[in-house]
Image: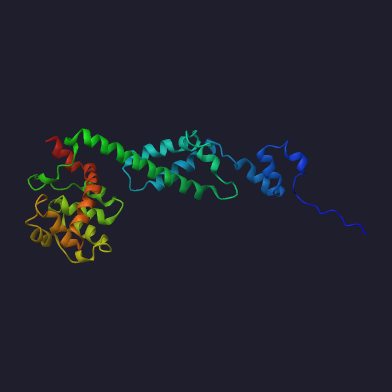
């Protein structure tokens, strides 16, 4: 008895060498699915431009507005540009058997983190050449202005709530904010610093009245937060540049 040949969708091996990669891929799928996937092997820029811009804005939430705008504008080009140390552009690493948008989110988040790192490196280099552009934090007590609503809004956008209380305390900006704004920042950071529970601005002013950045100031604030002074000093060195984003310090430097 003859055994009938089994029907399958796989291409004739002799014909594979004459096929392009998209044709091979489509042939190994059922006809309906292959026809849908084939044009997605390498999406054209105009097909995904709007999605890339939208996702770029989403993954860069919390960043400076001008930096987010710049990132959204350049993201599409970065996906398609030839990379010096890689054989193919980033877009050609996309697996068309998987959803496009989750892949774009992951890749664009990685690109955004790289951009932030490069921006910080340039900022650090520039600050080393121009130390006069560093935030003038020790003059806060003498400077009469209160923190503006715009600056308070910007502080509330800093990535982690603990940054807000750390920098407000060490920079002495807690002297220039309202009770309501302090309560908001304090309560959002309680997961990291539970010792702040119930601590008011009046308590801070009393507790930190002997604060001196060069003479035990870090120990006072560290004791309030429940961490080691050396840890707080390292936090300050890494995060102090966030203060340069505030109009408060820009105005101080201009005057």
Q: Could you tell me which quadrant the C terminus lies in?
A: top left
Counting from the top left corner in percent of width and height, residue 168 is at: 18, 52
Is any atom of residue 92 visible in this view? yes
Colour mode of the rendering: rainbow
Q: Residue at x 60, y 42 (%)?
A: 40
Counting from the top left corner in percent of width and height, residue 53 is at: 44, 41
Q: Residue at x 11, y 62 (%)?
A: 203
**Residue 195 sits above or below residue 170 on the image:** below
Is any atom of residue 177 visible in this view? no
Counting from the top left corner in percent of width and height, residue 111 is at: 42, 42
In the picture as drawn, the residue positioned furthest to the right comes out as: 1
| Left or right: where 229 falls relative to 19 | left
Q: Residue at x 37, y 40 (%)?
A: 115
250, 14: nearer the viewer: 14
Q: Could you tell me which quadrant the N terminus lies in?
A: bottom right
Q: Residue at x 39, y 39 (%)?
A: 71
**Residue 131 sits above or below residue 151 on the image:** above
């Amino acid at each position: 008895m003859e055994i009938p040949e089994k029907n399958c969708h796989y291409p004739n091996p002799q014909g594979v060498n004459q096929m392009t990669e998209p044709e091979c891929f489509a042939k190994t799928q059922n006809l309906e699915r292959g026809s849908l996937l084939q044009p997605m092997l390498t999406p054209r820029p105009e097909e995904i431009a709007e999605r890339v811009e939208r996702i770029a804005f989403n993954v860069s939430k919390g960043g400076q507005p001008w930096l987010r705008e710049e990132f959204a504008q350049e993201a599409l080009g970065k996906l398609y540009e030839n990379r010096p140390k890689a054989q193919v552009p980033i877009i050609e690493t996309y697996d068309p058997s998987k959803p496009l948008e989750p892949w774009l989110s992951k890749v664009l988040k990685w690109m955004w983190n790289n951009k932030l790192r490069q921006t910080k490196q340039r900022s650090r280099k520039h600050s080393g050449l121009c130390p006069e552009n560093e935030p003038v934090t020790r003059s806060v007590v003498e400077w009469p202005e209160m923190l503006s609503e715009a600056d308070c809004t910007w502080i509330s956008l800093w990535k982690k709530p603990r940054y807000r209380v750390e920098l407000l305390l060490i920079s002495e900006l807690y002297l220039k904010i309202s009770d309501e704004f302090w309560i908001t920042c304090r309560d959002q950071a309680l997961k990291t610093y539970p010792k702040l529970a119930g601590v008011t601005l009046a308590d801070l002013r009393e507790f930190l009245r002997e604060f001196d950045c060069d003479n035990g100031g870090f120990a006072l604030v560290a004791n309030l937060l429940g961490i080691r002074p050396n840890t707080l000093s390292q936090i300050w060195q890494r995060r102090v540049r966030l203060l340069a984003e505030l109009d408060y310090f820009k105005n101080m430097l201009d005057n």
